[in-house]
Amino acid sequence: MPQIISNEDLEDLQEMGSGAFGTVFHGRWKGTDVAIKRIKNSCFMYPSPETDKLVSSLITLIIVTIKVYS
């Protein structure tokens, strides 16, 4: 079941990169390192096949845990 995450629950946001659809940040959520993609409002102003595909992809939440051992 999808979960809504409040901005107040995200810590230490640092921009990693940006593109046509939005900006990706590194941050922490409940003590876990996460990547957060914030989508530009302009993506929703002018409907297009690309926007429809992007919005459809938001329905699925995928959490990936990466562990690095040295």
Image (cartoon, helix red, strand yellow):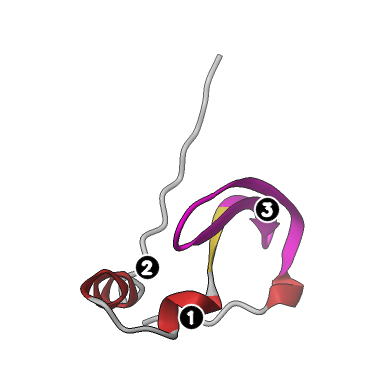
Q: Earlier in the sequence, mark 3 or mark 2?
A: 3
Residue lying at the far left in this picture: please name it: 49
The residue wearing badge 3 is: 27
Residue at 24 percent of width and 71 percent of height: 53
Q: Residues within 10 Å of mark 3 (few under 14, many from 20)?
A: some
Q: Residues within 10 Å of mark 1 (few under 14, many from 20)?
A: few
Name which quarter of the figure residue 62 lies in.
Answer: bottom left
Label the magenta part by its dominant secondary structure: strand
Between 65 and 36, which is closer to the camera in this rendering? 36
User: Is 26 covered by the magenta stretch?
Assistant: yes
Q: State the SS at label 2.
A: loop
Name which quarter of the figure residue 49 lies in.
Answer: bottom left
User: Is 7 covered by the magenta stretch?
Assistant: no
Between 6 and 69, which is closer to the camera in this rendering? 6
Name which quarter of the figure residue 70 lies in.
Answer: top right
Q: The residue under label 2 is which amino acid type?
A: Leu
Residue at 52 percent of width and 26 percent of height: 68
Give left or right: position of 1 versus 8: left
Mark 2–mark 1 contact, CB under 8 Å?
A: yes
The residue wearing badge 1 is: 3
Q: The residue under label 1 is which amino acid type?
A: Gln
